[in-house]
Structures are given as structure tokens and as C-alpha cells.
Image (cartoon, helix red, strand yellow):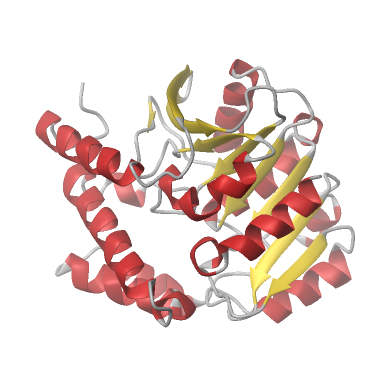
Amino acid sequence: MHFPFLSEDKKQRYVAHLAERAKAWPVPCEERTVETSRGRTFMRISGPADAPPLVLLPGGATSSLMWRPVIAGLASRYRVYALDSILDVGLSANSGPVKTVDDLVEWLDELFRALGFGPDLRLMGMSHGGWLAANFALRRPERVGKVVLVAPAAFVLDMKLSIVFQMISILFPPRRFWIRRTYRASLPGLARTAAGPAIIDDMTEDLALAFECFGVRRLTQMVPPLKASDEELRGLRVPTLYVVGEDETIYDPKAALARLEQVAPQVQRALVPGAGHDLPWSKPAELGALALEFLG
């Protein structure tokens, strides 16, 4: 069965590509797939078997491999479960309709129960994954102990329309041109670093290949992130750390911090200098240190 890939050949091509990329995972890793009523979930597990669990949720159009720059530090203290989303690129797949944030929360809740996690679970998400982590904490506060939100998409502020239009552009050919252009526009800080152009080239190839192997329809099924209301922000009672780069591109970071300070002062906040929507790649040491200090 090749779902959600377009064919068995394309599935094998994509799996081989990810296996090659995974060779750069810097710590020992166990790969596991867990079945739930919502579909199968692929994850990469690193860290001591007896350490507390920490689940990582990837950004949109990325897989668990996006956490390579920070996994070593996190796995030094936690049993880290880096997931592939069931509605995105990677090796997970939904087995039925997943159309709302409540569907995604139910998927995670069932998955966490299958893995035997208790209320000491830590949850960390980037961009779309940060938005999902925040919504899980809102809807299942008894299931999670602490949450780290890394530049969550739209949860605090709506995304800029210019960024939304750039994301739409990648649906059209020549696809690699538009994907690379979008990454350079949304990750300008990374593009200016010595290693940045090569990282962006790799990310471009990963996403372009995903389009070739999954098709456009699969990659447009993502549940769109929506801004939280004031009531929802005030209701976020799980200890939460919000981390954003001072050069964040998908919304105004200072306005986001100001809204949190006014509406949800219980949320801890951190502004990282010299970073945009590229924290795991441009500032992995700083991001890892902030997360570990908060998670305890």
C-alpha cells in the first residue's frame, strides 16, 4: 500500500531520500511507527530510556528531521519523540478525514496514551507544530506538564498576507524556484549565514521531492492555523514558554510579545536576537538552552 504517496515507486524514492538525510541525525535513534484510529504515526526516538518524555512537533512542510540541529542537547536529558505529522510530509499518514484542530488533538491524545505517557509529558512545537502544541495544551491540559512554543504560526498573531501568498506560490511551477524563493524570504537570517544557502538548498530539494512523490493535493490538506482569542490565551494554564526571534518574518514579534504580556502574562516569553523563523537552524544552541532551562 503506497498511500499517501502517488505510487509505490514514488514511495520507495521518498523513503530512500529520508533515510539518506537521517544519516546526519547526530545521536542514536530508534525509528518506530504507532497505529492509531486516525492513522499511522512515524517517530524518531532518542535519549535515555528512563528519562522523562519530550514530544517534538514539526513545522508545516517539514518532517521530524527538522529537529537535527537541536536533538543532541534535548536528548541529553529527555527521551525525545520527534514525530512526523499525519497530514504532512514524512512517513506518517492519516487513515481517514482529519479536517479540524480537534481531529489533530484527538490524534495526539490517542498516540500519547498508546505510548503510555503520563501528565509529566513535555511538548515542544515549531511553527504549525507550535500552534498544534498550544491547542493541545488548551484542550487537554491534564495530559501535558509543560509546553514550549517556537514561533507558533498564527496562534498569537495572524500571519502576514505576504507570507501566505509566498506559501501559495510554491504550488505552481517551476516549483524549486518558488520554494527556494519562499525559504529565502521567510528565513533571511539563515540565508545570510555561511551554512545557510546549503541548508536552504537541502530544504528546497526535500519539499520539491515531497510534491513529486505525494502530489499537490496531499500537501494542501494541512489544517490551517488560526489566531487564538483573548479568552483562549487567558485559559492557557499549562506552564508555557513562547520563543520567537527578533527578526521573525511571519508576523511582528514585538506585537506578539506585547499581546501575550497584556492578555496572557502567565506565559513565559523569550526573544532571541539575530533569529527569524529559523530558530532551530540559525540559533540551535540558544533555542536548546532556553527549552532545557524551562522544561527543568
Q: Measured along the vertical axis of the image, is residue 43 above or below residue 197?
A: above
Is residue 274 left or right of 189 when viewed as pictured?
Answer: right
Residue 266: percent from left, percent from top: 89, 58
**Image quadrant in which the C terminus is located:** top right
User: What residue lies at 62% left-to-right and 48% top-to-bottom?
Assistant: 73
- Work out whether residue 216 can be spotted: no
Determine the residue located farthest toward the left in the rendered image: 9
Residue 177: percent from left, percent from top: 20, 73
**Image quadrant in which the N terminus is located:** top left
User: What residue lies at 69% left-to-right and 64% top-to-bottom?
Assistant: 243
Q: Measured along the vertical axis of the image, is residue 24 above or below residue 34?
A: below
Is residue 184 left or right of 41 when viewed as pictured?
Answer: left
- Work out whether residue 24 can be spotted: yes
| Picture quadrant where residue 175 is located | bottom left
User: What residue lies at 16% left-to-right and 33% top-to-bottom?
Assistant: 12
**In the depicted view, which residue is nearer to us: 10 or 232?**
10
Is residue 196 left or right of 117 when viewed as pictured?
Answer: left
Q: Measured along the vertical axis of the image, is residue 68 above or below residue 8?
A: below
Residue 235: percent from left, percent from top: 84, 50
Residue 46: percent from left, percent from top: 54, 33
